[in-house]
Image (spheres, coloured by chain):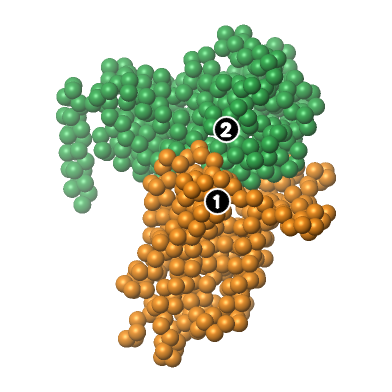
Chain colours: A orange, B green
Amino acid sequence: MDFSALNPVALLASLMIAATPIMLAAIGELVVEKSGVLNLGVEGMMIVGAVCGFITAVETGSAWFGLLGAALGGILISSIFAFLTQVLLANQVASGLALTLFGLGVSAMIGNGYTGIKPPGFNTVNIPLLSDLPFIGPAILSHDPIVYIGILLVILVWYFLNKTKNGLVLRAVGENHDAAHALGYKVIWIRFSAILFGGMCAGLGGAYLSLVRVPQWTEGMTAGAGWIALAIVVFASWKPFRLILGAYLFGGVTIMQLNLQALGVDIGIAYLSMAPYLVTIIVLVMISSNHLRSSANAPGSLGRIFHASQ
Amino acid sequence: MKLLKSILMGGALFFGLSMSAIAADPVKVGFVYVGPINDGGWNTAHDKARLALEEALGDKVETVFVENVPEGPDSERVMTQMALSGADLIFTTSFGYMDPTLNVAAKFPNVKFEHATGYKTSDNMSSYSARFYEGRAIQGHIAGSMTKSNIIGYIASVPIPEVVRGINSAYIHAKKVNPNVEFKIIWLFTWMDPAKESDAAKTLIEQGADVILQHTDSTAPLAAMQAAGNVIGFGQASDMTEYGPSPRVSSIIDDWAPYYIERTKAVMDGTWKSQAVWHGISTGMVGIGEITDAIPEKVRAEAIALQDSIVSGAYHAFTGPLNKQDGSPWLASGETADDGTLAGMTFYVEGIKGKVPN
């Protein structure tokens, strides 16, 4: 087997790109789940973000405005979920699934007429000196800005959840909403804002697909990325930095799988295609087998409906 | 409950029969699509043909379609629904609909079914397919002539004979003009997933491919080639001219319209019979999109000559001597492949590396 055709620089670079959309969506969902809400509508929010970002970018001619449009689109669609689950106290699982179906449908509708168009792109970041470093420069330090925004967002979320008062309050709400309510925290509004943040992140993740990674608009183009983002949150056991690891692992296996095929590696291709999903399942099993650990990490009130009178 | 159901069914059947007895009633034609109609590729081509059918027959025909229907049990539900709502003729346009179509056709003997790219038929189910491999021969010739790195990438979709035929045909003709050529094949196990298609194209480019052929439905690979520059590819199923004159240098266009019009007319006249057809470039079912200026005049002339010889029947894309991948002889010198072997082709020809997944 000749592995010399594998270019580690290109490999690492495409890994980072493949990981970014799921990382963005996953970090949003992590905050949502930390506040005690399970939103299974990530896929729907991503695709709405993808189409809103694409349309805004094409109409304004600016990819940055596209990102803004995607964030607003994600916030708008997630507010439906927030209203249903926090105000009307609807079942979170059902509402989340409905949100995915709704998002897929509505994105197909508004995206009609935007197929076959090339969106404006981002300039790649060029840091003087650093981007010219051998290996690290082309592999890690010369991507589009969103790759770094994604990583920055994860760091900020980590800081928020662990080092700020509001972050601790959000976690308290997620762990035990009755206790948090008794202490005088506004459970509904904290969760409402967390859901909107999740919607924004998923929207950005979707826009990364339609503006950078593919870049074009096609119906149903997220093709399950939202579900992977959900899995990564569990994979990371609700820890932001582990989430980066999960996203890169997932992106890495996807890219490796394609590269090994192109190299003609003689193992079952179906297994290679399955590999990312298998890794997720294995890690899920590993995490859940350690009973103490998973119960220590999963937010205590995850998925439970809160009503002040109870 | 069962009695009620059968009374209702009987009623529906009677109603359906009495409706079709009125001559002025338009023929209702249903279409089942595997992806969105605006994918720019396979499904767009089928839907364009549907619109052409409406245009050609005017108010004598009424069409309905359902898009994004997954292959498998769900498609059976969609077809049943169509048949129950009075469709006279139903086109199911993806390989994976073959068995579902067969099942539903057995339940509705008065409805005609047409299944694309399969090999099973019954009294009221035809199969129709196009000899896309003829177009692949031309693409292979262009690819072999144009590559400088001698590495040609191939984004394969689902391991069925149609896709394997395409790879073999392209390889044979690339090899003919360029003995040093090597194929790198990536199977995606899906007809459409733009992010994956794009990643596959990028991977092939990173591994040195400067010509990429695709058998997936979206234009994402062409977008990736355009971003990379210096890489050429081909439109698939639809012309995809929005990516011309480069990276899209030519294309295989599926033109189903004449067939759809012919078969709908046959239902109107009552002359519809179950059949299995396999048309190529000569009847227009397979169209070759314009070869752009990015291709040197000499190569273009050769490609057109190859196309002409296929159309006239003077040349068959699978002409011996050809060996199978393991080196065992397949076709003797001058011998051409029979349709039976081609329809069930699950092996690579000699020289292609890797295995056909199963």
Q: Amino acid at mark 2?
A: Tyr
* Residue A245, horizontal then vertical, whole percent: 67, 65
The front one of A111 and A58 is A58
Q: Nearer the viewer, mark 1 or mark 2?
A: 1
Which numbered dot is residue B243?
A: 2
* Residue B330, horizontal then vertical, whole percent: 70, 22
**Residue at figure coordinates x 35%, y 42% from the top left:** B78
Mark 2: which secondary structure? helix
**Left or right position of A105 against B312:** left
**Left or right position of B88 against B235:** left
Say which quarter of the image contains residue A159: bottom right
Q: Amino acid at mark 1?
A: Ala
Is residue B180 among the parts visible in the rendering? yes
**Left or right position of B263 against A59:** left
Q: Residue furthest bottom?
A: A183
Say which quarter of the image contains residue A310: bottom left
**Residue at figure coordinates x 81%, y 46% from the top left:** A3
**Residue at figure coordinates x 72%, y 25% from the top left:** B146
Graded by Cα atoms within 10 Å as few (under 14), some (14 to 19) or many (20 or more), the crowding at tag 2 reads many
The front one of A236 and A150 is A150
State the CA–CA distance, disc 1 to disc 2: 20 Å
Graded by Cα atoms within 10 Å as few (under 14), some (14 to 19) or many (20 or more), the crowding at tag 1 reads many
Q: Which residue is mark 1?
A: A63
* Residue B347, horizontal then vertical, whole percent: 66, 31
Say which quarter of the image contains residue B337: top right
Task: Decide: is A299 above or below B193.
Answer: below
Quarter placement of the C terminus of chain B: top right
